[in-house]
Amino acid sequence: MSRLIVISNRVSVPKAAGAAGAQGGLAIALNSALREHRGIWFGWSGQETEEFTGHLDMQRNEGVTTATIDLEPQDIDEYYNGYANRTLWPLFHYRIDLTEYDRSFGEGYERVNARFADSVTPLIEPDDLVWVHDYHLLPIGSMLRQKGVKNRMGLFLHTPWPPTRLLVSLPFHERLVGSMLEFDVIGFQTEEWLGSFLHYVEKEMGLDINEDGTIDYRGRKIVARAFPIGIDYTEFVEGAKSDEAREAHDHLKASVRGRKMLIGVDRLDYSKGLGERFESFGRFLTDNPDQASKVVLLQIAPPSRGDVASYQQIREDLERKTGHINGAHADVAFVPIRYVNRGYPRRQLAGFYRAADIGLVTPLRDGMNLVAKEYVAAQDPEDPGVLILSQFAGAALQLTDALLVNPHSIEHVSETIKLALEMPLAERRRRHEKLLASVRDEDVVHWRDEFVKALFGKDGEGARDEAA
Ligand code: ADQ
């Protein structure tokens, strides 16, 4: 069997079974694939070093080998905080107003991708399959090819892919996309993002898309396809039955004292639509004054990317909005918004989801959104809560039985909250049953297996043809 080499910006070191609750579904799925394929997970350690040496820190934990490198402060500034999170992330989430173009970011991005390529190349054996993750590493495929790596290589993009008219505002966009075509498989979360990518490839690069969706490029056939990511369903449902989940559920339920609860769980990121969400909830309270003492919104939002100014701004903005709405609608015995800036272990999170009557998942743009799927998986099928989901999350293409909303329309979201609170049990069950089937059947294991199958290629050959 071919080995799997996973390359991503950061590496998640596997935890012992007892600590598995602290890891994300993606890390668990990739770690189990790495165990099956005797693979290596390579990436940045998250640590700084004064001078880049290329030293590889190799570790073996729970049957998985990880290999990490440290980066220089300038690398982290230009590559991670710069090009990845101030240029590509906002652009890929349709926020060209927040997108910063600085030549030094682009140079840092290429430099770090080259450092990744230099460091990982000696680890790659001829039959290995190489699986690269996300927007941090788009050009690494072409750098590996330049270093003579002939293996089958795939890229999976966790974010959206922007429409061509937005993407062309990026200086050197042709070079960036051209370098991606050195991968054999390019995966997207949804048909929509795939469509935007193919549109670019056709219109800007003048390439033909074959009927089966493949792209012919310099004598090679590239597979571009949608592989919607899922959650680790089994692990999540088991976690939701744990004592920790039950305790978290009971504790939270007791604290709201009979009030209906809405829950939001997101990294603190402008793409998640938190400001609009708070405003919508505020509008609901204003339009339904009799409800003000009967509902509470719990928003869990751990800070992320705090070195980037737009993230500091969204944090301040949300603190102001929370204060404003709570000031207007609170009474001595209750506050309508509980806004919590920290992370929780996954099992506790499952208990919180189950305690909530409504899952409020309203990103302005999101590659997929796993919180929506976790909310569905955590519900009691006999008495499930209602999922309100943004039509602009990748998940909306699968979770069509959620109440789909336009998160920009404060009125629409506010009215949908009312609808969800009044939804009869029979309808809640009917919707939940369908949502659950989708979350269960298209889980993270299915996603991973589909991608690895595509990476193997039709004939199951690991190594790519010498002539290609
Ligand atoms: P994210 O933007 O991080 O991921 P999401 O898919 O919602 O968004 O995943 C977040 C994960 O972090 C979830 O598993 C959630 O439970 C967890 N999480 C969030 N807040 C937490 C908290 N306070 N405590 C504990 N855990 C918390 C990117 C893309 C998404 C895509 C995923 C996977 O932006 O669109 O779905 O990758 O491909």
Image (cartoon, helix red, strand yellow):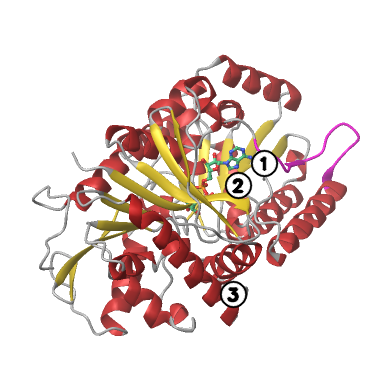
Looking at the rendered structure, the kind of residue marked 2 is Asp
Q: Residue furthest top?
A: 243
Residue closest to the eye, 182 or 298:
182
Q: Give the side of residue 161 with respect to residue 314, left or right.
A: left
Q: Which is more foreground, mark 3 or mark 2?
A: 3
Residue 212 part of the magenta segment: no
Looking at the rendered structure, the kind of residue marked 1 is Ile
Q: Point out the tag, 1 or 3, that comes first from the N-terminus.
A: 3
Q: Is mark 1 within 8 Å of ligand 1?
A: yes
Q: Point out the tag, 1 or 2, that comes first from the N-terminus.
A: 2
Could you say where residue 196 lies in the image, as x and y percent from the top left? 35, 71
SS for callout 3: loop
Quadrant location of residue 276?
Answer: bottom right
Specify the segment rendered in magenta. Answer: 329-343
Residue closest to the eye, 376 or 219:
219
Residue 340 part of the magenta segment: yes
Q: CA distance from mark 3 to mark 2?
A: 21 Å
Could you say where residue 330 lies in the image, as x and y percent from the top left? 85, 42
Q: Which is more foreground, mark 1 or mark 3?
A: 3
Q: Is mark 3 within 8 Å of ligand 1?
A: no
Quadrant location of residue 27?
Answer: top left
Res. 266 mark: 2
Residue behind mark 1: 300
Residue closest to the eye, 356 or 284:
356
